[in-house]
Amino acid sequence: MVRHYLSELDLTAQEFKNLLARAAELKKQQLAGQLFQPLKGKVLGMIFEKSSTRTRVSFEAGMVQLGGSAIFLSPSDTQLGRGEPIEDTARVLSQMVDAIMIRTYNHKTVERFAEYASIPVINGLTDLLHPCQLLADMQTWFEHRGDIKGKRVVWVGDGNNMCNSYINTARLLEFELIVSCPADYEPDPKIVASGGDYVTLEPNPSVACLGADIITTDVWASMGQEDEMAERRKAFANYQVTPELMKLANPGALFLHCLPAHRGEEVSASVLDDPKSVVWDQAGNRLHAQKALLEMLIQTR
Ligand code: CP
Ligand code: NVA
């Protein structure tokens, strides 16, 4: 059966944890210089309708390390940009490659692609979710601190795709998520409600961060919202993760950020470079977590 990874909730809690454990093993092997090439001859197609550094490089390097290869496809030089329907593209690419990763705007686009594809489809970020990032974020917490069940995770800033993905993951891995957003920038109430008792809104970041185990944030204007930057700068002025906010957290707390970061906006430069910040490990874990994902999706086809 073809499996897709469009949302964290496409995996069971056990599958999610198994992937984290597998990612840790693959990381060890890679760092020890051991070759492991179960995907020899396999090809990943990567459609990017938005920019990327980490997602593109981690998927491409990951496929090569697993013995396969990846093809970068942008709308500007494929027929997608000239209006070929996503449904047709899905059926055509299914004849040629072994899996597809898509980064796009509307989440429905990846859902439609998956409906028409006969190969695994991976969500490389939509306006709704960023599920590959959550695999890496959780791998990073597990490798530094162990299980996350019952821990207090604080989201500071915009109720965006990353925030929604944290809500899904709180449910799966049973951690407490405090979402601290300015008025009018909270996540969709339906998504908040789907998090049940695991998710609470607390608009005051100083209250939210008290006793936190993780403080995490993201840019104030996501890709596609560049025009709103001036008004967002005003709305989010009190939502910067500063050393003062970090001091309210538990002694072993970590700072996470999916990157790219805007120093002096959602995070102060000193927090990003503090020893509590594990953002470089987090970025590196995109590679290992997605290798575990590719191994699972492509091999179990
Ligand atoms: N965090 C993340 O997805 O980074 P890119 O936009 O560089 O892929
Ligand atoms: N929320 C950000 C995440 C970037 C990785 C965006 O969608 O642009």
Image (cartoon, rainbow, N blue to C red):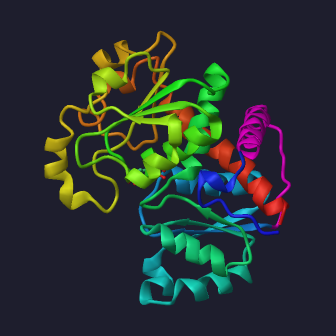
Q: Residue at x 18, y 35 (%)?
A: 237
Q: In this figure, what is the number of numbered marks?
A: 0
Is residue 242 positioned above or below 279 on the image? above
Q: Residue at x 29, y 21 (%)?
A: 206
Q: Residue at x 43, y 45 (%)?
A: 163
Q: Is residue 275 left or right of residue 33?
A: left
Seen from the viewer's position, the closer of residues 4 and 255 is 4
Residue 30: image location, x then y, percent: 75, 38
Figure quadrant of residue 277 = top left
Figure quadrant of residue 106 = bottom left
Figure quadrant of residue 143 = top right
Seen from the viewer's position, the closer of residues 178 and 105 is 178
Dominant secondary-structure state across the stretch colored magenta: helix
The magenta-colored residue range is 13-41
Residue 70: image location, x then y, percent: 66, 65
Please identify the residue farthest to the top as the structure is shown: 251
Q: Is residue 293 something one can see in this rendering?
A: yes
Residue 104: image location, x then y, percent: 46, 67
Would residue 30 be counted in the magenta stretch? Answer: yes
Quadrant including the N terminus: bottom right
Residue 273: image location, x then y, percent: 39, 23
Is residue 77 positioned above or below 108 on the image? below
Seen from the viewer's position, the closer of residues 2 and 267 is 2
Is residue 120 positioned above or below 213 on the image? below
Q: Residue at x 73, y 34 (%)?
A: 24
Would residue 114 be counted in the magenta stretch? Answer: no
Quadrant including the C terminus: bottom right
Q: Is residue 164 something one can see in this rendering?
A: no
Seen from the viewer's position, the closer of residues 57 and 278 is 278
